[in-house]
Image (cartoon, grey):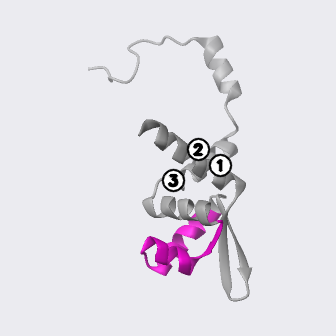
């Protein structure tokens, strides 16, 4: 029985396929984009992104209180957001403040806009 999601015969539109392949971003860019997209794939990270979008800057203590989550859990998630390039941190004395990067703000705003459009 043939796979339901694949063609039964090779029907390659070579000019179209070559143009699509040529126009794909490099693998490194796709990997970076996927990492940013993963930031939205967890409810805790999504809540952190929304809180940072609305507050501008927050420390982990504030984020943990807002989310009602353990500080260690929130700290883990903000590290992942920072590694994905959607948040950055800055030490201020004994406090570490987090905020969205331009990419993080754009990603969060686009996601929220898309969710509102389908709601």
Q: How far apart in space, not on screen, are marks 3 and 2 (Cα)?
A: 11 Å
Q: Residue at x 68, y 52 (%)?
A: 103
In this view, 55 is above or below 71: above
Q: How far apart in space, not on screen, are marks 2 and 1 (Cα)?
A: 6 Å
Q: Residues within 10 Å of mark 1 (few under 14, many from 20)?
A: some
| Mark 3 or 2: the one toward you | 2
> Is 44 left or right of 62, judged from the image as shown?
left
Q: Quadrant of the C terminus?
A: top left
Disc 3 to disc 1: CB gap under 8 Å = no
Q: Which residues are magenta?
A: 56-82
Q: Residue at x 73, y 88 (%)?
A: 93
Residue identified by numbered label 1? 106
| Mark 3 or 1: the one toward you | 1
Residue identified by numbered label 2? 110
Q: Nearer the viewer, residue 24 or 61?
A: 61
Question: Quadrant of residue 2 in the image?
Answer: top left
Task: Residue 83: give x, y in percent of width and height.
Answer: 63, 63
Disc 2 element: helix
Residue 40, numbered circle? 3
In this view, 66 is above or below 13: below
Q: Nearer the viewer, residue 96 or 116?
A: 116
Disc 2 to disc 1: CB gap under 8 Å = yes
């Amino acid at each position: 029985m043939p796979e339901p999601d694949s063609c039964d015969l090779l029907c390659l539109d070579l000019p179209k396929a070559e143009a699509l392949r040529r126009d794909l971003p490099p693998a490194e860019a796709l990997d970076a984009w996927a990492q940013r997209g993963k930031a939205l794939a967890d409810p805790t990270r999504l809540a952190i992104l929304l809180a940072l979008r609305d507050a501008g800057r927050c420390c982990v203590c504030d984020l943990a209180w807002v989310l009602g989550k353990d500080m260690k859990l929130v700290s883990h998630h903000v590290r992942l957001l920072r590694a994905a390039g959607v948040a950055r941190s800055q030490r201020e004395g004994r406090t570490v403040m987090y905020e969205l990067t331009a990419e993080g703000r754009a990603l969060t705003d686009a996601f929220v806009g898309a969710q509102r459009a389908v709601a």
